[in-house]
Amino acid sequence: MSPLAQVLVDGIFTGASYALMAAGLALILGVVKVVNLSHGAFFTLGAYVAYVLEAKGVVHPVAAVFMAAGIAFAFGVYLGKSFINPVRSHPFAVAVGSLGFAVLFEQVAQMLWGPHPLSIDLGAPWATFHGVTLRRWGVISFLLSLGLTAGLSLLLSGPWGLPLKLIAEDEEIARSVGMDVEKIRYLTFGAASAVGAAAGALLAPAAAITPTMGRVPLILSLIVVIASGMENMWTLFFLAVGLGLLSNLGAYLLTPSWSYVLLLAVICLLLVLRPSGLATVAPGRDY
Amino acid sequence: MKKSGALPYAKITGVLAAGAGVLLLLPLAGLDAFLLNVLTLGFFVAVFAGSWDIVGGVAGQISLGHALFFGAATYACALLTSLAGWPFPLAAAAALLFSAAAGAAVGALSAPLKGPFVALLTLALGEAAHEFVLGQTFFSPRGAYSWGGEGGIPVLLRSQPLSPWTAYYAALAFLVLSTWLMLRVARSQEGLIWTALSGSELSARASGVDILKHKRRAFLVGAALAGAAGIGFAACVGRATADDFSLELSFQAATFAAVGGRGTIVGPVLAALVLHSLLQGTGIPPAGRVLLYALALLVTLRFFPGGVAGTLRERARRRRMVVQGNGEVR
């Protein structure tokens, strides 16, 4: 009983951080209107930042989150302004280019930190209930993910979210009322990347840190975004938690690599069953 | 290369001929065995890049899982020759059929999808196949060691191993033949329909084209050609590994196509040949190689987002207009 309970609790905790990541991807999809395959790289970046901080003696999720988010925001703004914005209207350039950035980052990470899995040592467990171990990092990261997702949803429904919603709805009108659409786009891209990196930093102790670790969360958040759209943050949140549970159960009952195959099967099934895909990324012109 | 106008390559037929001459001459000019091998494998990689261009360039279906077809062929070859004990030619034929079937299956799944979703589906299918193959191990009939995964499975040729010279010329002949075939296909009726599809699905459908059928066919043809390249590659290397399915390989194919000019067949083939030979021949470690591929890709996409060939064609058109109308553009 207790190993399964542990797997379930861990699944919920990781799912919350995946929700954060998926929220970032949904934001990019809605406002920048591209399917961003480099989102997983920012997740990996966050995890490595947490690892390096731990190696330097700073073992706290909040520190890791802010550091990772700051670095990722800078890179995200660069990527959004100098690459994604200029090539936005070319589906080939966006898909292959964003994948290219992910591959580039994977190689750089491999050069900097090596191909071998790294891990963060968290020390003694924080509390134990009936054989289920809670760790301080896990609890804080769960609460932080929950808070950040709630904050994001609040922000989007408030006055700050209005320009983003307008651009997602109709960018011509947004431009005609004097908004700097391109600027909002790359800032959104940066912020969403920062959110992805924050999720990576929060989840760093839960997984083996490798250069290609970002692929699993990328696929997972793509599933979430395709299935739930970006209207409601809470559908997105619960879907991510559900998938986190599924992937953790898959890893526990089968093997970790099978849980990845399971997620890939889910996304294939989803795409085949919903060929029209998302309304938000299908602009007026047909491909 | 008969008709001019449609493809910018019509003007460089002479250059292509000279290139073929150089490639024919190289082994005679005392190239060492290592570089000969790099070029031999480069010919197969070039055909693989060309086969990507059939699907991704001519037909416009962005495939990020093209290695699936390549790996399906190498694995089928290896399993049939080593485990089932088939003779190589029979195994090669079966492998070709298998990769074509994989292409038909992927094509059937992705045909109703549009733009970025084709990329997502092919990416997911390719990754799933890679992950699946990575976890499979087979017990070798001889000796108590296991095959599969990163270590790979040997491909048994069951004959005298080809001399590097023979392999080189055979691969070169395969490249020339496949490139000719791909160009023929791209300019056939079918290829024209694919081009129309990649231009605008809506108008293709409006003119009465069964777009699903033709998308499936594009995948079938591209997969069969990728499989053919995989069979040759596996025969030369003598081993099929899980890397044959990897995302990096699919990504490389897309890179060659983007750098060489999507939809032109000759461009991706040349880009693959040049980049592969340069990076493999100079002994850069694999990680550095992928890094350089990614950089080449990003620079190309940034400055030619609509494709190298398209942008150059556009520029040439502008220049012609400037000459015809007294120095004014348009």
Image (cartoon, coloured by chain):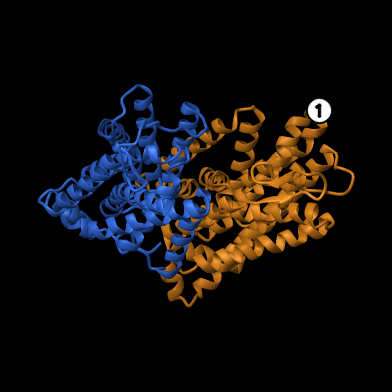
Chain colours: A blue, B orange
Corner quadrant of residue B178: bottom right
Does residue A10 appear left or right of residue B264 in this picture?
Answer: left
Q: Position of residue B196 (x, y in %)?
A: 49, 65
Determine the residue positioned at 16% across, 54% down.
A174
Percent coordinates x, y for residue B29 in the rendering: 80, 29
* Relative depth, front residue between B204 and B291: B291
Q: Is residue B114 something one can see in this rendering?
A: yes
Residue B320 visible, this orientation: no
* Left or right placement of residue A232 versus residue B211 in this view: left
Nearer to the camera, A20 or B172: A20
Q: Amino acid at mark 1?
A: Gly
Chain label for disc 1: B
Would residue B114 be found to the left or right of residue B269 on screen? left
Residue furthest top in the image: A56
* Residue at the image point whose x is 30% and y is 37% from the top: A126
Residue B145, percent across and down?
A: 75, 43
- Left or right of B40? Residue B196 is left
At 68% from the left and 62% from the top, the residue drawn is B98
The residue lying toward the viewer, choosing from B105 and B133, is B133
**Residue assigned mark 1:** B30
Above or below, A235 relative to B202:
above
* Mark 1 surroundings within 10 Å by alpha-carbon count, few (fewer than 14), some (14 through 19), many (20 or more): few
Q: Measured from the top left, where is residue B166 in percent x and y?
A: 84, 42
Most extreme residue toward the right is B160
Residue A81, above or below A7: above
Q: Quadrant of residue B90?
A: bottom right
Seen as rendered, the residue at the extreme front is A130
Q: What residue is at 78 percent from the left and 58 percent from the top? A: B91
Q: How many marks?
A: 1
Q: Residue furthest bottom?
A: B208
Secondary structure under tag 1 reads loop
